[in-house]
Image: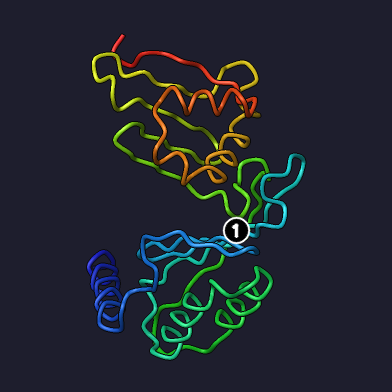
Amino acid sequence: MKHIAWTMLKNSSWTFLRQAGVLPFRGETKENEHLRFHVWNSSVKVWDLENAGKRGKTVPVMVVWDADFVQDPQLLGALIDWVKDLPKSTFAQAVARVKALDAMPVEGFGRTKLEFRNERGVDVAPAGFGPIIINTPNVHIEADWNTFSVRDHIDRNNEPTCIPSSKGGKDSIKVFFRWVKDNEAAIQKMKFEEVLHGMDQAGIKYHYYCAMD
């Protein structure tokens, strides 16, 4: 009986959330200079970006769980408005507002749960370091805070590729990311060899290999 009641209750809350409209930005990661957030079906994770990318520092993280359980229309509406306003909020504002939601009286069963924790600063990309993907007739480039790759689109037989060097390449990842951001327009016309030349000039350490070997 407990299992049946639990299933009916959860199904009921899912139906209500679906009728009221799913959380905004579902499946997306967005950020401003203060915070980054990602929205799942039933949860929202928010990072404070003040110490993002800094060694020896920690990044406060807040997770709002169980949005799919919310049945009270006022709480659900306030939760949706909170997510909509995250792109223009600071982390402190986001925390204060969601704590106020957590204290709201609700009708019936269902409310969110809050979790607070810290992540290492070096593991969290600073603002503006979201993933980059450049795909041209000549090259395919992917870059984020943790790695990069450059692949030749012309030489299909060998598929020349470069990735961060195992010796000193970790520090070059950030340099590569900045170099790509600064030269994104020019890269659209570059061939693979020209990209590597630009990386050499920027002092980026990389490992070159043929993916077909």
Above or below: residue 160 compared with residue 17: above
Quadrant of the rendered image containing residue 19: bottom left
Q: Could you tell me which residue is drawn at 60 percent across and 26 percent down? A: 204
Q: Which residue is mark 1?
A: 47
- Front residue of 183/24: it is 183
- Residue reaching furthest right? 56
Q: Could you tell me which residue is drawn at 45 percent across and 22 percent down? A: 162
40 relative to 203 in the view: left or right: left
- Front residue of 149/182: it is 182
Bin the neighbour count of mark 1 within 10 Å (Cα to Cα): few under 14, some 14-19, many 20 and up. Answer: many
- Front residue of 68/193: it is 193
- Front residue of 39/181: it is 181
Instruction: Tell me the quadrant of the picture where the C terminus can be found.
Output: top left
Q: Could you tell me which residue is drawn at 41 percent across and 83 percent down? A: 76
Above or below: residue 62 compared with residue 150: below
x, y percentage for residue 36?
56, 60
How many marks can you see? 1
Q: Amino acid at mark 1?
A: Trp
